[in-house]
Image: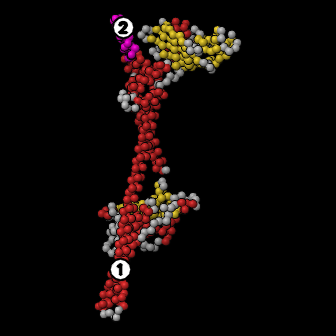
Amino acid sequence: MRTLLTIVLIVIAATAVFYAAVHQIAGLWLDVVLRPDVRGVIEQSLLDQKRLRDLDPANAARYRRRFEETGRLMNHIDVVAMNRERVLRRFEAILAALFAASLFTATFLWTARQRRAEERRRAEQLARLTAWQEASRRHAHEIKTPLTAARMEIDRLASLSAPSEETRHAIDSVYEELERIAQFTKEFSSFAMIGQPVLRAEELDRLLIEFRDMFANAWPNLTLRVDAPPHVVVSADRDLLRQVLVNLCTNSAHATEGSGTVTFTITRAGDRVLLDVADSGGGVPPSIQARIFEPYVTTRKIGHGMGLGLAISRKILLDHGGDLALLSTSPAGSTFRLTLLYARADTAAARDRVTR
Amino acid sequence: MVSALLALLLAAAPPDRPALTVAGDRVLVALPPSILKQKEVRARLDSALTTTFIVKTKDSNARIEIRYDLWDEVYRVKRVDAEGRVAQQQIANAAQLEAWWRTPVEIARLAGDRAALDLELVVLPFSAADESDARQWLSKSGGTRDPSIDSKSVIDALIGTTLSARPIVSYRWSLEARR
């Protein structure tokens, strides 16, 4: 609706400008014909034909024919001159209407094309992340099976007759390595096991305030702020959305040296609700900005995270019918934009209506 | 000086009332020559366009057309009465035109002994034929000459609804005649 309104306003403004321009120049073509000196020449021509008739009576018929042709031209000019303002007004109105119709159609088609391109891009992203998710699930499964078997073998080895000090040390070392693999697999699984959202109508502003209060102490170096109008209802899975916010805040906490802030801002954009999450961290390095939502892309050291948080977050938002994007980033901070679908909250049925 | 002033005053004064007469069952109207002396009408009569006078009653119309022929320097006049009868002639000068103008034209049929008519006279600066010619001319000017391209129809639509003869002056009278 808002898009349509925007298009209409653009078309009206452009048409008004066009109309003003046409009004300035449209009279030119008509005034060329209606110039008094043009009429003067025609009148003189009529008089000349009559003089020629008197001087050369033998060719009177020929002069008469020319006279009548010229006379008709003068009549046409007189008729048009009497209707000049009406002709011009209609001419301008038709041109403006054609212009407005063309502009409206072009803008509408362009907007529709943009939307289709956006939908296609989202679908591609979702398919790619789903493929990654499936691969992660398989890898996790393949690792877990031998991991469990190895643990059982080590347990059995440890339970045998009292091992030597050297054997004991080796068993502990193997335990430690297996635990690292288990931890690694757990993270892997978390990506593989993102559930499909159960969408409900949720008041986003309230959800953010609850999040701010609940997680006020979760990241000691961060202060959470909410800047949101009341009663902004979105179609969302509360738990999954909270997971996204946790991921973003965790990243912000890592990117912030000393203390910083994370600000949540809500704006409406037609049938969408935009939630901007802005931090005061060090920004996303240019080298990974283009790939930041791909799995395993991270700036952290090996063993300090696998770079799945943003991929998981985006997958969750795409599953919501929305999106997650890096809106801006600089050494002064980054802003991520969550796009969610607006949901009407005026009926109790809203919660039931909003489904996958 | 005095005659010029008098002419100016005559041109500005409203025209006299038409006269209704009854001949048998026909109601005839004689339009006052002062109409021809009205400033707006006078200016049109000497153009090469056909000045058209439409005499309207509730149920019928009559039409008078006057065109000055610049070549022969005569007035070509045409009268179409309420029954559709057409009378055409050419008139040498303004004085004869005034005399011809006084000739009554049939405007209605008398139903009883008395005819009460609301008469309207509309003066148009050009005829339907002039209008049609000008439309075609302007349509050719604005439209394409390539018959395979249909942009001409847009111009035609534009011209067709804008070029029209708007009355330069009109009068209304309530008149009565008895058998």
Majority secondary structure in the magenta region: helix
Task: State whether residue A310 appears in this view.
Answer: no
Looking at the rendered image, the quarter that the C terminus of chain B falls into is top right
- Secondary structure beneath disc 2? helix
Query: In the image, which disc is placed on residue A147?
Result: 1
- Please name whichever residue, A346 or A143, is drawn nearer the observer in this view of the structure: A143
Give the CA separation, mark 1 to mark 2: 118 Å
Image spot of residue B170 (x, y percent): 57, 19
> Which comes before the other along the chain, label 1 or label 2?
2
Toward the viewer: A264 or A75? Answer: A75
Residue kind at label 1, given as amino acid type: Leu
Is A58 one of the magenta-colored residues? yes
Q: Is residue A23 above or below residue A352?
A: above
Residue A30, image x, y percentages: 40, 26
Question: Where A62 falls versus A128 (above or below)?
Answer: above
Where on the picture, by quarter, is residue A333?
bottom left
Q: Position of residue A295 (x, y in %)?
A: 35, 67
Residue B11 vertical placement versus A106 (above, below): above
Question: Is residue B10 shown left or right of residue A297?
Answer: right
Residue type beneath disc 2: Ala
Residue matched to label 2: A60
Kindly identify the residue that appears in the image at 50 percent across and 16 percent down.
B51
Q: Secondary structure at mark 1?
A: helix
In the image, which residues are magenta?
Answer: A42-69
Give the residue furthest to the right. Answer: B113
Q: Is residue A314 magenta?
A: no
